[in-house]
Amino acid sequence: MGAVMSNTPIKRIKSVSYAKWGYFFIAPFFLVYLIFHLIPLGSTIYNSFFENYRSGLSQIGPKFVGFQNYITLFQNGELPKYAWNTLVIWMMGFVPQILVAMLLAVWFTSYRLKLKGQPFFKTVIYMPNLIMASAFAMLFFLLFSAIGPVNQFLIQAKILSDPLRMEESTTLTRSLIALMNFLMWFGNTTIVLMAGIMGIDQSLFDAAQVDGAKPRHVFYRVTLPMLKPIVLYVIITCMIGGIQMFDVPQILTNFTGEPNRIAMTLVMFLNKHLQSKNLGMGGAVSVLIFLITAALSILVFQSMTKEMRAANQQRKQFAKAEKEAK
């Protein structure tokens, strides 16, 4: 008997593609980024090429002047001076911050030390990060003012004969700003580094101890190389935050950056132009800050990943040679 052929049409199951829904969910991010980042960035770059400011009740401009705003910033010497101020204050706070944070991260994650009360200490070191920078700066302003409790204690203890005045001491002003930045951010840096260390395979530490490696050798040969991507992230984010330093020196120096404007940072300089409605100069300063941030981030990234890129290149060459040999 021959096979009986059915005349019933075969139903095809239509496949459903969910790829388009991915674009639907990521669309809000790109929309927000376009409206609140790219469009303002383009507007800032555009305004930087115009003379546009207010003089009394009169509005001057907008008048196209090309790169004149940028030339003026470098001719009067203000921008390099304030960039140097920002760098010095940031370094004064960041160097002890990364050193102390690395030390605490290693201690808290050490299976050998097994420190007690870790949750309490982690909470304490992170708490200053939760305080508003403006409130923190106001607290230090009151503590270290000429009639504040710190000066009163030092005078009564016969350590000082005259009170220390922030508006007269370059070292004191910069040190206080650096100290506040250190206190506010070293806890956050410690938590990030701890997360990176806990992500390292514990068998590497066990193997190093079995081989008789000392703690400092374990740190330099195991912990630090494996932690390099996290350290790179910390350096770049802290550097960007340092370039954007504003509220602490602004409040501590009463909006002046005194003495002799040694505490005037780049963003304080930008804010001065925005307050005076000088949109052209403000735009030029903003663009230069953006370029400085981008250049330094690329420089740090390239220098920190040089060894990793060289290792990847060697692996590719080895794989290519092995493939050709076959």
Image: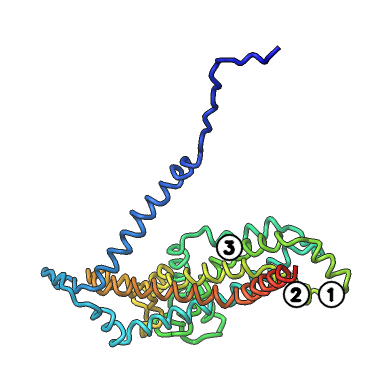
Q: Which mark is residue 152?
A: none
Please name which of the two marks, 3 or 2, marks the residue nearer to the observer: 2
Residue 36 horizontal/vertical position (percent): 35, 56
> In this picture, is 321 found above or below 38?
below
Residue sitting at x 54%, y 26%: 12
Which label's residue is closer to the chain start, 2 or 1? 1
Residue 145 horizontal/vertical position (percent): 43, 75
| Position of the N terminus by quadrant | top right
Q: Nearer the viewer, residue 42 or 155?
A: 42
Residue sitting at x 22%, y 68%: 277
CB-based contact (under 8 Å), mark 2 and mark 1: yes
Which structural element holds mark 1? loop
Q: Residue furthest left?
A: 58
Which label's residue is closer to the chain start, 3 or 1? 3
Q: Which mark is residue 213?
A: 1
Q: Which mark is residue 188?
A: 3
The residue type indicated by label 2 comes to Arg
Q: Nearer the viewer, residue 291 or 56?
A: 291
Q: Which mark is residue 221?
A: 2
Which label's residue is closer to the chain start, 3 or 2? 3
CB-based contact (under 8 Å), mark 3 and mark 1: no
Q: How is the image coloured?
A: rainbow
Residue 62 horizontal/vertical position (percent): 16, 69
Cα–Cα span, label 2 and label 1:
10 Å
Note whether residue 163 is visible.
yes
